[in-house]
Image: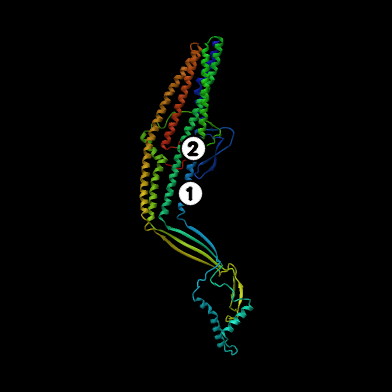
Amino acid sequence: MLSELLPSRFCIGALALTLFVALSASGRAAAQTQERPRPDLIPSSTTDSTDRPVLREVETDAPTALTVNDAVRVALEKNFDVRRAELDVRNADAQVREAWGQVLPQIDVNAGYTRNVLTANPFAGSDVSTIFGGGNRSDWVAFNEDRRLDGDPTTEPISYDEFLRRQRRSAEQAGINLGGGSDNPFGVDNEFQTGLQITQTLYNGSAFAAISGAEQFKSVTRHARDRQMQIVANEVVEAYYRALLAEERARVVKQRVERTERTLEEISVQVAQGVTAKYQRLSAEVDLSNAKTELIDARNQAELARESLKNTLGLSPDAPIRLAGSLEATADDRYLQVSRTRAVDRAMNQRPDLERARLNVELEQIRRKTTRSQYLPRVSAVANFNYSGRVPDDRTVVNTTNPQDPTDPFFYEQSTRDFFDDSYWNPSISVGLNLSWNLFNGFQTTARMQQDAISIQQAEVQLERLQRGVELEVSRAMRTLETARERIQSQQQTLQVAETNYEYTAERVEEGVSSQVELRQASDQLDQTRLNYLNAVFDYLVARSDLETALGRPLTEASARYQMTSR
């Protein structure tokens, strides 16, 4: 019976032995297909304002297969922090346009309407009424003088009262009431006013400095966006490999459960046949229960890791994804021969946040120039185009000029003018220059200049602090990477020893020298060693990602295409 069980035990050992090789092969196959187009993440020909490719998701019931590059690409489209940084850049663009608007022509249109219900007589209380009242007497004198000098004896001068009587009779015959009309001849019922004003700035130091400041602020936000992309890419890489590690752990624990179940079946048969002690079956049952509990925890951790990855990517928690990558350490490392000094110099030249801090110092200097420009005058050219109308309700007019006899004082003709008659509407045009110069404002500008000088010093201190922090960050990342590589080498040796021990124990079980308990112990040691190796690989991959982030390099090909600035 023992000889019949040995082949199955050998199969169990062979299955466990080839586990790590199979995982490595699947990882290499996934890496080879990493750059192939995915049916669920198809690059679109559409481009946005930054000429970056836009990804459009194709809805499908199948899980989306993601490599590291795919994950970074999705995050750079959907991550909330990246989208917020993108909005900051767009806001900076709008501020630049707003700053330019201060030196472009300003056009203002105004219009108004006034209804004069009761208008005061501007000449009330003065003797000017006697001047207008003498109009008829002048006409009477001119009429009599014409009659006296015309050489006709039948045309004798007439009295003033007769002259007025003939005027009233002529007006009545024309249907005109000379006594009607308003008591105030200067009042107009309707007044309209329409104006167009064009102002062009000729010199405004504050406006010109504001344009430079807005352009500088735009550069600051662009570098801030680039740095945010690098940070998000690093978070995606870490979350991606953490999810992979959790899946590998769940897979290893599942295989352990399966092996323990088969071992329990074999031991149960041996106990029933009386060739194995009962305590071994009880021990195998305890091991199986513990393994199942550990599997539940491993699956839960794997699910939580995927949820964390989806949150980092900016995807919905319900979005199905499948990780197509593998935990593998690169054979050659480009950072092995890089010295600390060279790495720090590279970080100083490549880090977008350092460039942002430098630009921020320049931005504070521009703001100080903006404040200093308040000592200077502001000059602008102004042009006004106005069109006004004074239209009465009663637009009836009396014409006293006879076309046939212009000297006839008794001619009266009544007509009504149109609402838009030229006599009611009048245009006006004016041009000029405006100069505004504040000579004293209580030393407010001087105080603001002092504040701006302090702001410049604060920005310089912040830049220096960031530079020291970058040096420390690069040094730590390099040490962590080297430590992780040493751990991988150590774990590789340990893994080889564990594999050899398992093979040796399996052979001894076949020969009947060792027991199933010893085989389970060797198997558990091999599983734990593999998990330790995968943890070391994970730490190494994360450390390499952290170092690249510290250096300011794009972590993946996808993140490189999304960079907005080049250094």
Q: Which residue is mark 1?
A: 94
Disc 2: CA contacts within 10 A as few (<14), some (14-19) or many (>=20): some
| Above or below: residue 143 compared with residue 98 | below
Q: CA distance from mark 2 to mark 1?
A: 28 Å
Q: Tell me where residue 563 appears, x and y as whole percent.
A: 46, 41
| Above or below: residue 371 compared with residue 182 | above
Label 1 sits on a secondary structure element that is: helix
Q: Quadrant of residue 413?
A: bottom right
Q: Tell me where residue 194 appears, x and y as whole percent.
A: 53, 63
- Which mark is drawn over residue 558? 2
Q: Is residue 326 visible?
A: no
**Along the line of sight, which residue is nearer the eye, 84 or 398?**
398
- Which mark is drawn over residue 438? none
Q: Tell me where residue 192 appears, x and y as whole percent.
A: 54, 64
| Above or below: residue 187 compared with residue 359 | below
Query: Which mark is first along the chain, 1 or 2?
Result: 1
**What type is the residue that disc 2 sits on?**
Ala
Q: Tell me where residue 407 appears, x and y as whole percent.
A: 57, 81
At x 48%, y 49%, the residue is 94
Q: Is residue 558 visible?
A: yes
| Above or below: residue 545 compared with residue 291 | below
**Along the line of sight, which residue is nearer the eye, 402 or 74?**
402
Residue furthest to the top in view is 274
Q: Quadrant of the C terminus?
A: top left
**What type is the residue that disc 1 sits on?**
Ala
Q: Quadrant of residue 441?
A: bottom left
Is residue 242 left or right of 367 when viewed as pictured?
Answer: right
Label 2 sits on a secondary structure element that is: helix
Q: Quadrant of the N terminus?
A: top right
